[in-house]
Image (tube, grey):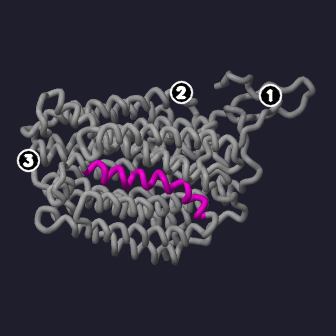
Amino acid sequence: MSLPMRPAQIVPLVVATALFMENTDSTVIATALPAIAASLGVDPIALKLALTAYLVSLAIFIPVSGWAADRYGARNVFRAALCVFMAGSLACAAANSLTGFVAARFVQGIGGAMMVPVGRLVILRSVPKSELVGALAYLTIPALIGPILGPPLGGFITTYADWRWIFFINIPIGLAGIVLATVYFGDIREKTRPPLDVAGFLLSGGGLALLMLGFAATGRHLLPDGVSWGCMAGGAVLVGLYLRHAKRTAHPLIRLDLLKHDTFRAAVTGGSLFRIGTGAIPFLLPLMLQIGFGLDPLHSGLITFAAAAGALLIKIVGPRILRAYGFRRVMVVNALVASAFLAANGLFTAQTPHWIIISVLLLGGCVRSLQFTCVNAIAYADLESREMSAATSLASVAQQLSLSLGVSIGALALEGAAAWHGHAGIEARDFSLAFLGVAVISVGAFFVFRRLAPDAGAEVSGQRRVAQAVPRPADGSPQSIVPIGGCRLSDRDDANTKGASLAPVTPQHAPEPGRRSV
């Protein structure tokens, strides 16, 4: 008789249907970019707007996802988001112009902004902290099947049929997600919830949209330089007004005060730098293989899927690595290794044997996936349950903006390399400078992660926390044992059912500020 699956297993698998659909969609589109550009009659680099439009839509609407889940229930919002995403997919298939395609991708982003963050919020509120890494593995392993199947499938459809058919893949997956959420999700919502920060939504959403539109439109495509710079200036003003607004309102849409937690701040800032580099890969790599090396979409997809396969392999041993070495050591070393693999993509030529390219992509996918596992898990290591919703929104906004910047910076670096080499079109040698440029940005994560405490996130990673011995007080009272960093188990959580959370205290015999005992 088989044992029933626990929430730490079944809930992530349900959420994985949404992540599977989103990841399949993005990887299929990346493989089909040159074919879509030819069909719409635009330069392939101009399609960076289609990629960034989706990511910017995510960044705008993700902050509302936590409030919507608390107001209407996570299950209802999750199912509605799947419906919106499927509607956007059908609109993409019907698009006949770049403007229409970009608009359809924006609609898809509205659905994606709700379904994945809300699904992650369901996991965070249903799974004990001690099982969080394992639960995230259950989430990402099925979801990584999408990127593995996406490039070959998208290449096959684009080569032997029509690229529009790739968007119909989302329909049966979305319907399955709606059914599974109906069966397995509870009515998760907060009993007390703050009002929606409408002014904050307008300021932050408008500011981020203008900033990213202006930045993505720079170069030789779509908008005059004056309009692009005007969008960026206007966006910067609105973002500045939001920062001022957030300090004066009781319940801001995006809670920047959560950055006071060292682990969360490192995950947001260091993770963003790392994602800027890796976010350029889905844009640059298919273009290099198809435009630079002359491969058809099918053969391009059969090569690029290796990165996703490597990401799937590392999920099996990732938790063991974290338990053995801890977050800080893994993230510091991995930031350098992953950036080196990113730069190595620029060393490929049309004469490079495909098995070498596949091997590099496979290993690069392994180290990048391990880094993402670390960043996603340590972000919530020191947060209380009541902070999870706001933290999920802020972390997801930073993630999508950094990925959008990766696409835009990769495209700008590619255009800059072409101008440096003195030709108008994109050639194979231009990709070397582009990959090197985004790799340099990715290395910046190293300097952020190395500032973490050696035992950062130990409760989540499973690494044994070292207790410090405290001298017996002079009055003969019992000796106290305080975990490193002056933390104790919060009395508000049941360690057997909810997982023990660490709450800061200031005990009588805690270490002096600025000093750490070993």
Residue at horizontal 72 percent and vertical 62 percent from the top: 192
213 or 379, which is in the foreground?
213
Residue 241 location, x and y as percent? 58, 41
Residue at mark 1 = 509
Dot 3 corresponds to which residue? 294
Mark 2 packing: few (<14 Cα in 10 Å), some, or many (20+)? few
Three-letter residue code for mark 3? Gly
| Residue 29 shows in this picture | yes
Residue at position x 44%, y 49% in the image: 209
* Circle 1: residue type: His
Sequence-first tag of 1 and 3: 3
Q: Residue at x 64, y 58 (%)?
A: 196
Q: Nearer the viewer, mark 1 or mark 2?
A: 2
Query: Which residues make up the magenta segment?
Result: 47-69
Q: Distance between the residues labelled 1 and 3?
A: 68 Å
Q: Does residue 93 lie above or below 293 as drawn?
A: below
Q: Which of marks 1 and 2 is nearer the N terminus?
A: 2
- x%, y% of residue 156? 15, 63
Q: Which residue occupies 76% across, 29% down? A: 510
